Image (cartoon, coloured by chain):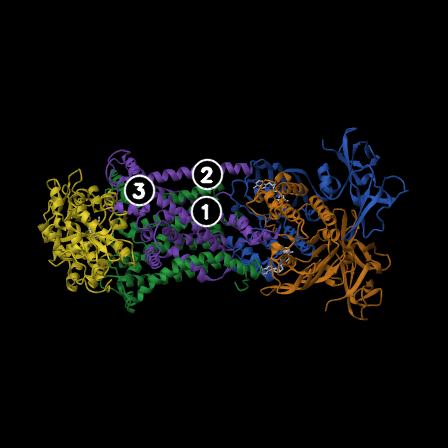
Chain colours: A yellow, B green, C purple, D blue, E orange
Amino acid sequence: GESSNSDGTTVAAADELKPNADLSKQALQITVWPGYTPEELPARVKQKLKVQGLKVALHDTNEIAMQKLTASGDSGIDVAFVSGQYAQALNAMGLLEPMHPELIPNLANLYPEATQLSYDKGNKYSVPYTWGTTGICYRTDLVKKKPTSWNDLLKPPAWAEKKVTLMTTERWLALPALKSLGFSVNTDKDEEIQKAKDLLMAAKPHLLALDDTTFGDRLKSGEAVMVEAWDGWCPTNDPKGNIAFEVPKEGSDLWVDTMVIMKSSKNKEAAHALINYILDPEIHSWAAENINYKVPNKAAMERLQIPKGSLLETKPAELLNGESLVDLGQSSLKYTRLSQDIKAG
Amino acid sequence: MKSEVKARPVAPPRGRRLGAFVFLSPGLTYLLVLLLVPLAVVLSYSVFQRGRYGGVVYEFTTENFGRLFDPLYLSVVGVSLKIAGLTTLIALLIGYPTAYLIAQLPRRWKTVALVAVVLPFWTNFIIRVYAWIMLLSGPGLVNSGLKVFGLGPLELLYNQGAIVMGLLYSYLPLMILPLYAAIERLDPQLREASANLGASGFTTFRKVTLPLTVPGVLTGCLFVFVPSFGNFVIPEMLGGSKSIMVGNLIRDQFLTARDWPFGAALSLALIAVLVVLLIAQAWAARRA
Amino acid sequence: MRRARLLYVPFWATFVFLYLPIAVLVVMSFNSGESAYTYEGFSLKWYGELAGDERVVKGLANTIIVAFGSTALATVLGTLLAVGLARYTRSKTLDALALMPAVLPDLVVGIGLLVFYSTIQLTLGLYSVVLAHAVFSMAFVAAVVRTRLTNADPSLEEASLDLGAGPVVTFMKITLPQLAPGIVAGALLAFTLSLDEFVIAFFTVGNSEQTLPIVIYSMVRFGVTPEINALASLLLLVSFTAVIAGQRLTKIGESERAPD
Amino acid sequence: MLQIDGISRKFGDVTALDDVSLEIGQGEFFALLGPSGCGKTTLLRIIAGFERPDAGQLWLDGADLLPIPPNMRPISLMFQSYALFPHMSVAKNVAYGLERERLPKQEIRQRVGEVLETVGLSAHASRRPAQLSGGQRQRVALARSIVKRPRLLLLDEPLSALDKKVRAEMQLELKRLQNDVGITFVVVTHDQEEAMSLADRIAVFDNGAVRQVDEPVALYERPRTPFVADFVGANNLFHGTADGPDALKSADFGSLPGTPLTALGAEAKALLAVRPEKVELVDDDAAGGVKGSVLDVSFYGGVSHISVDVPGHVKPVLVAVQGASAVQPGAKVRVRWEAKDAVIMAADQ
Amino acid sequence: MLQIDGISRKFGDVTALDDVSLEIGQGEFFALLGPSGCGKTTLLRIIAGFERPDAGQLWLDGADLLPIPPNMRPISLMFQSYALFPHMSVAKNVAYGLERERLPKQEIRQRVGEVLETVGLSAHASRRPAQLSGGQRQRVALARSIVKRPRLLLLDEPLSALDKKVRAEMQLELKRLQNDVGITFVVVTHDQEEAMSLADRIAVFDNGAVRQVDEPVALYERPRTPFVADFVGANNLFHGTADGPDALKSADFGSLPGTPLTALGAEAKALLAVRPEKVELVDDDAAGGVKGSVLDVSFYGGVSHISVDVPGHVKPVLVAVQGASAVQPGAKVRVRWEAKDAVIMAADQ
Ligand SMILES: Nc1ncnc2c1ncn2[C@@H]1O[C@H](COP(=O)(O)OP(=O)(O)OP(=O)(O)O)[C@@H](O)[C@H]1O
Ligand SMILES: Nc1ncnc2c1ncn2[C@@H]1O[C@H](COP(=O)(O)OP(=O)(O)OP(=O)(O)O)[C@@H](O)[C@H]1O
Ligand SMILES: NCCCCNCCCN
Ligand SMILES: [Mg+2]
Ligand SMILES: [Mg+2]
């Protein structure tokens, strides 16, 4: 591989790959969030691609995946699913194999917008799998006024006192404050981060909790009335129909979960074949249908019957209004510090 | 005591050396390979620098240790000490009588009672925490109950009290089991002798039972205090992430900030404190 | 001697405290709704769901394997270590070392082992979790057994040696039975801790294996469903039954041995 | 002072005490004597409050003792197994009871010092029990229970691990406590000489039941049951039937001289007991007595015991004489005694 | 058979054994006698291998014993504190040593049954030690060590918790083991009568050192040091200076009759010892002897002890007579003895 601390723009030298390699000599190991791919994927991949097999390891956060992939040497993983800014960091560390577009004809299925993502313009080392944004998820029956601004969370009205949550992971914790102040979610300017921190400190006494896993449950039980949420995790499909999602007027982010191929992989042809297979509309639409996330695959989205009002209706162009999160390198520590300050304060 | 005399040697030196080898070497070897070596690797990161995108750049620096003295970290240590200390104290106060009574049960029932102590923990941790949330949250069972009487709702969750409660719940068996093992071996005649000499139940406890079970008390306290101090899940789930403890700091470095060197420095500091505690514990237990 | 009544207050308080959330959990396993938060009516559907959930069943099997494996390993190593520390050394440093894994942050142990395993190119699997869990479990066993050895009267062992038993027989027949309550308590702790441990397991488990806490931890990310409660309830039921049965068995065994 | 009323206690199917009733007077030195396992310790434990009787009553100065918890009873028990606190020094062990009474430190120190002096352990005050010899431990246990000067002192084999000299000193000390401080004693001992010389009265136990309560000399000279005759001191026993006021009719030896203690029906089965030291050893050709031959002569410091094989009698007849004896084993002799020196009692059925 | 050669042992600043040398013959019954805390247990523990001497050697049949670990020594030790295995039944405790020899099950069962019969605990075979009385425990400990029939049996106060009757039976059994099985015994006992009657030879210890080793009668009748004279049995001691072959010159009482055991320089400080049973009590107006008045008469089953206050002598003079005595306290008397009945020895410096 390359030196591991070069900045993210260089791309590691590509291996020579053979388009007609004998896949039956290769076996695949992927790591992915639980429930993020169809259960029958291993069986179908084995049958379709004629590889020896596909093993699925699970990680439930990007952080855990990063630990496993970066700890040292060969993690044994061929294809990893991580969010965009983490793909960017992995690449900067020289751990990723550049994509060989010639081995992934299905890239053509993607929306054009999906090749313009700021952490990896042109999909040089990552292929997007799902995308979405962050907004306010709320109980239509418990709010007195429909939330439209991040300030509704940061300075909750009396009826929402101690009934709102923000996320706990540092970049999303900062997001509402940064956006409401009109700053970039990728800012590394100390004074902007300081202002965001002041705003959050002021908000803290009015919050129920910081939470990025169970906010949906809290809404359902009525413990919370408004929460900061990723669109797909906002339970708008709850049978009671009293939960809605809103992207605040100040704007938000665009997150992308991507597929990357590890430099250490010994099955790179099969890895490419797998990504190509996942971009098949039939497979890729499974994600949208089953995990309620939009997929950046035009052909796949067009296959779907999207119910009215579903979050899946959001158009790629609207999504691109959101600012794509990029890895900030050394500056990301400022966000760690911000989140610790808020929790300890 | 001045005239403290060494314990009687059990076997001649040759046997002792062999015994030391037979008993100590398997465990110590295991620890060396699977604990000390890995730990050394991780802790060695503390003198290097964080890579721009995470990972470790092998360039020497002491700056990670300098950062330890940031008031933020000191205040987190303060909060952690308070929470872990309180947890330990309560665990001891309710754990001791429980262990004591279990040790008095007829032989057959002892094991049953012990298993009853750990059985709740054979379910899943997260589920148990959720059960507490269900009980204590705003619309939860306790508040619903209070509402019937026109009371509440109380803010039972997402504060330091809830953290203490959650830690107590998680670590109580770690207090009870060592205490049980220590209390169980006490000769009941010693308690009888004490009562006979006019000591009340409490005095007997204070003067005879407690001093003779000091090693168990120390072990139990250590087992509760240290993981409480380093816990990061309970502060998030029951404390609503609104307070952090030392465990969260370390977790953040390794997982979110990907600042392994600083995480290693924090760990090293924590371990240094631990080692001091452990040696103090060993010293006190050996004296008892 | 009569026991102080007052002691029963904390005794029962302890058990109420331990079992209150468990009761809630069991009740919620019969929830007909989707949420583990709000009870919507009685249903057994989650038990059905459970039976069909391969990940959960596999995870449970793995967890039990790991718990038994690591407990067995830790109990042997920990007991030997405790005896060795109590009888054959005065080093407080070794005492402290033996306790250390029990009190180190899981994360540090987990990451350390992950780095270590991959450095020596060990292929991860369930056994790597067994080895990892035994590290901290051993410390718990050793510490609990230790509490029975301080101030222990060596004359029983001397009597055994005197009667011609070698050190090994003496250890097996005299020392071990004396330590038994400590060993049982230590092993119970080890088993319990392993069953529920996930941070270290996360880092040391093979890529294609999962333990139940890992499975549950990731299920929770999508909201807790009563399925997990159903699983927990089943686990409890099985354990309770095993314990009661075991208790019956020892009762029979005892009455055969000695009338008292 | 202490009234024991119909106390029974069973352990599973072992009857440790069977309807035991005793009355012990204020300031009395009362000894319990009996074979190993007959229930002596159990009785003391019941009096001290560590064992509950299955039936029966206990009264101390007229007040019911049973409802009173052990630590409130004005009674000290010295445990047969000592039960010393292993984590405390000798001095701390001894001071323990006094500290419970909240006496001034100064007084405690003084009384502990005195009692350690008495039991000869002043030099060992700061040692732990594990660093003491067996007899030293026993003395610590003794010191710990006497230092409190309780109303009632229960001692379970208090001097069994001590040599003659120390034992004599301790006996003297116990007597002093009885006389000067007025403590009531109940002492278990298997040492009959000790019981005889110390006790005002002795209760002989067997199998959980009281067989005889009497003053030492009376117990020795006038045992009322074969068990007591056999158990207390050495005795030569002859079976036969009652034969008037001064003899027993024996099938093998004809009429043997002796004094019945109670009226015995003619021809009632009876037992004659005569102490070795009351038996006279005379020449084979002397008049009266029973013929036999010397089996063995052994010298127990101060006294010689001569056993004489008497054909027709299962056990050899024992004879005790002062000092070393000149008789040789094998010598033909006669043993005889006077009617006033032998007692005749009803035999067990 | 066993040769103890210059053994010393210190615990911190306590000297438990100080250069002890003894030789014990094959099949001998050897007793250790001495005050509490004099080092008897320590010596047995060294022989058994649980304590290492600071100096000295041990030989068993000419082979160095010290390097042999305790479990390989053909020696059984009965612990003063019994050390019964609490988790095993009585039968299991007793069988333990035999099982280690891998004897056939059948034989083990039989031998355990026999020895339990011997110690009278057959009915208790399946009980745990905690369910036994003190004396029963001691008998289990005894059974456990004798059942192995080792070459050398070390017994530390084996019978101290037993009543006279059981004790006599056990003594008989020990004698039988010595004679029939040929076991060598080293027995610690504080019971002098026991030592006297059982032992072939007795070693008297004091303060970690051997004071005299002798056969019982010799030890009793010819103590070589004031300590032994005073410790073994009761003795009346008079200080003075050597005065020819048959007297001691006493400042207060003039010439007292006695026999020096060793040559004593004229005017050397000396001590005269005379046993109570050798002292004669005669009327005040009889000739010879020392004048005094009766202080106390007490009856120790079988023997009366009379103490006579002799002006000028610190302790009262003890006189022992067979049976009950007619003398009354306060009576004016004289005590006297014959020269052959008293020994004169050099006094300690
Ligand atoms: N572990 C020890 N530490 C310190 N001193 C000890 C220890 N063991 C014994 N001693 C001392 O050594 C001396 C000899 O003890 P030992 O047990 O041999 O006496 P003993 O002759 O058996 O006495 P007893 O008849 O009372 O049992 C005693 O003064 C005792 O206090
Ligand atoms: N906990 C117990 N369980 C069963 N049996 C017991 C228990 N304690 C005592 N016994 C039995 O009760 C009887 C009386 O025991 P106790 O201890 O009172 O005897 P003792 O007269 O003190 O004898 P010793 O002189 O041997 O000490 C004995 O046969 C004993 O075996
Ligand atoms: N922590 C980053 C989360 C980005 C959203 N991805 C969610 C996928 C997990 N199910
Ligand atoms: Mg007893
Ligand atoms: Mg001793």
Local crowd size for mark 1, using a 10 Å CA cut-off: few (<14), some (14–19), many (≥20):
many
Which of the marked residues, 1 or 3, is nearer the chain's N terminus? 3
Question: Which element type, helix, strand or loop, lies under badge 1?
Answer: helix
Local crowd size for mark 2, using a 10 Å CA cut-off: few (<14), some (14–19), many (≥20):
some
Q: Disc 3 marks which amino acid?
A: Val
Taking the image as shown, residue E173 lies to the left or right of residue A111, namely right
Which of the marked residues, 1 or 2, is nearer the chain's N terminus? 1
Mark number for residue C184? 1
Whether marks 3 and 2 lie on the same chain: yes
Q: Is residue E302 above or below residue A74?
A: above
Kindly give the residue lying farthest to the top in the view shown: D266
Between B154 and A8, which is closer to the camera in this rendering?
A: A8
Task: Indicate which label's residue lies in the foreground, 3 or 2.
Answer: 3
Q: Disc 1 marks which amino acid?
A: Val
> Where is residue E68 shown, x and y percent of the image?
62, 58
Which residue position is annotated with label 3?
A: C56
Q: Quadrant of ligand 1?
A: bottom right
